Image (tube, rainbow, N blue to C red):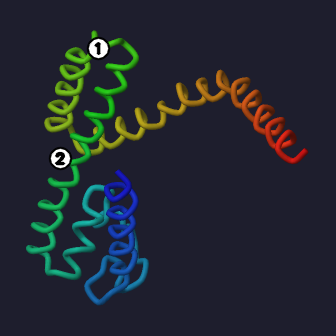
Amino acid sequence: MFIDTFVVLTLNALVIISTLYTKDGALANGYIGDVTETIVKSNLAQTAFGTVFGEKFGAMFVAVTLFFFAFSTILGWNLFGKVNADYLFKGKATKVYTLISLVFVFLGTVSQNDLVWGLSDMLNSLMVLPNALAMFALTGLVVASVKEVKNNREKIQK
């Protein structure tokens, strides 16, 4: 997941940033007019790699790498969710989770690109809620553990 998320996305961002003002870049002549006509969220990487490799090969390169990135991400998150569903529901919800995830994968392939990204961002943001609730619920346990560690250190130092 680290390579998927941090390394690949950082390299992608660096390519995009470094090609915006090159000879063939989207902002080669400076900011003129509405740049959003040529650069939108979905083709930003394609535009950047097209600047470096040529428009046709850049588009093919982005398509192939995006396929592998998306495929590995779907497999990774599906496994992650399945393990969590198995733990939370004692193995009773694994098939239901798999069915729901397959439905969402299918809907993601037939829906508009901006809708899919918007829903993805929203659902990822909503993961803050159960994590924040769990952190508040575990606060007492953390405080007790810190006190225990402090007491053990004091005993060792004496």
Q: Which residue is mark 2?
A: 71
What percent of the width, then of the height, locates residue 2? 38, 55
Front tag of 1 and 2: 1
Q: Nearer the viewer, residue 4 or 89?
A: 89
The disc at residue 45 is none
Q: Quadrant of residue 52?
A: bottom left
Name the residue type under label 2.
Answer: Phe
Count neighbours of disc 2 (C-alpha within 10 A) and say few if under 14, some if 14 to 19, many if 20 or more. Answer: few
What percent of the width, then of the height, locates residue 106? 15, 31
Name the residue type under label 1.
Answer: Gly
Secondary element at tag 1:
loop
* CB within 8 Å, label 1 to label 2: no
Q: Earlier in the sequence, mark 1 or mark 2?
A: 2
Q: Quadrant of residue 48?
A: bottom left
Q: Nearer the viewer, residue 66 or 78?
A: 78
Q: Nearer the viewer, residue 43 or 57?
A: 57
Give the residue drawn at x 19%, y 57%.
Answer: 66
What percent of the width, then of the height, locates residue 152? 79, 37
Q: Which residue is mark 1?
A: 91
